[in-house]
């Protein structure tokens, strides 16, 4: 009863926030789901209800499956490599013997502070056929005939992955560093006195005690990476030959290039359903931890 009274008293203070969330988040979500059930174009006011026809057409669309495959490759490569390199950087920055650690921590954040569009334009210049990277490769003799990274089907998606890792690595590193610093030093000291080596400490202390931090960071990075649009759009625009096309870009093209608003909205709905998988897995793991405590 007391909790109900407290909630009732707090409701007027929460009402502005609830309205803002409803306007900013709930309404666009509902509007997007409803749009996926209609067939329309940007230039037409008349909308006709088509039900799940957009989704049926989507599942028979080769470009959808190609973009979905590219998206999965994109997420797995980006997040896994960001985690590996991020954990390595965080471990190095956590060492007491490293001088000027605060300076290096600030430098690590520089890519994260760069707007993705600006970073994409800079990297598009670097990775151009006659850009600085290819000039260095030719000059040093590492590659006599380096490829055109952004316009060659076998390299375009890889180039986008590298740029996205460069952008996302600072966040991963800093979050993992925060997790490492939260581990009590006396735990490592007790393990050292028991004769544990560095690898055993990492496997039996570091990773188990960072499990919750890793789950949060990896879940967030999977969601953000899956929804990435600007990096691929600036670097390759899905080309050449749709070799780097991902779902967010394909949805954008359907709405603003092909004028199929309902079809583009259906791609967004499918993306949402896919993203519910890692989110539900994280929530289930979190509830298990709460029950265990």
Image (cartoon, rainbow, N blue to C red):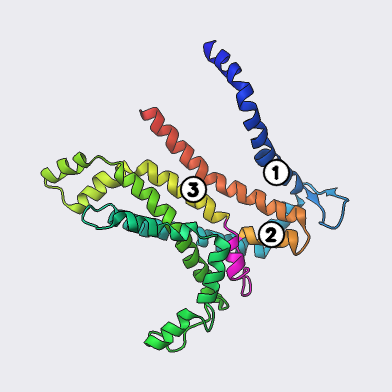
**Residue drawn at (34%, 58%) of the image:** 104
- Considering depth in this image, is 204 or 213 the residue closer to the camera? 213
Query: Pointer 1: residues within 10 angstroms few (<14), some, or many (20+)?
Result: few
**Residue drawn at (14%, 46%) of the image:** 192
User: Rounded to the nearest whole Å, what is the CA distance between mark 2 and mark 1?
Assistant: 16 Å
The reply, left or right, for residue 213 in relation to residue 2 is left
Q: Which of marks 2 and 3 is nearer the N terminus?
A: 3
**Residue drawn at (29%, 55%) of the image:** 101
Q: Mark 1 points at which residue?
A: 28
Instruction: Classify 29 as above or below 198.
Output: above
Which element carries disc 3, helix, strand or loop? helix
Query: Pointer 3: residues within 10 angstroms few (<14), some, or many (20+)?
Result: some
Image disc number at residue 220: 3
The residue segment tinted magenta is 228-246
- Considering depth in this image, is 253 or 275 the residue closer to the camera? 253
The reply, left or right, for residue 11 in relation to residue 94 is right
Q: Name the residue under label 2.
A: 252
């Amino acid at each position: 009863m007391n909790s109900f009274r407290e909630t009732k008293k707090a409701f007027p203070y929460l009402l502005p926030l609830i309205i803002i969330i409803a306007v900013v988040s709930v309404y666009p979500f509902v509007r997007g789901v409803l749009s996926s059930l209609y067939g329309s174009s940007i230039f037409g006011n008349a909308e006709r209800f088509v039900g799940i026809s957009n989704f049926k057409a989507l599942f028979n669309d080769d470009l959808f499956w190609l973009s979905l495959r590219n998206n999965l490759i994109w997420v797995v490569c980006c997040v896994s490599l960001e985690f590996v390199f991020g954990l390595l950087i965080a471990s190095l920055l956590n060492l007491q013997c490293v001088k000027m650690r605060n300076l290096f921590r600030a430098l690590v954040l520089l890519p994260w502070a760069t707007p993705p569009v600006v970073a994409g334009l800079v990297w598009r210049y670097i990775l151009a056929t006659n850009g600085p990277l290819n000039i260095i490769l030719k000059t040093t003799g590492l590659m006599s005939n380096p490829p055109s990274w952004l316009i060659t089907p076998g390299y375009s998606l890889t180039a986008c992955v590298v740029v996205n890792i460069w952008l996302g690595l600072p966040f991963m590193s800093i979050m993992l560093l925060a997790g490492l610093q939260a581990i009590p030093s006396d735990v490592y000291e007790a393990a050292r006195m028991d004769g544990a080596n560095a690898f055993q400490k990492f496997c039996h202390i570091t990773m188990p005690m960072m499990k919750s931090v890793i789950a949060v960071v990896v879940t967030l990075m999977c969601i953000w990476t899956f929804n990435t649009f600007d990096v691929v759009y600036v670097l390759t625009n899905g080309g050449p030959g749709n070799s780097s096309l991902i779902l967010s870009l394909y949805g954008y093209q359907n709405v603003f290039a092909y004028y199929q608003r309902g079809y583009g909205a259906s791609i967004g709905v499918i993306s949402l359903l896919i993203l519910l998988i890692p989110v539900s897995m994280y929530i289930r793991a979190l509830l298990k931890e709460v029950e265990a405590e």
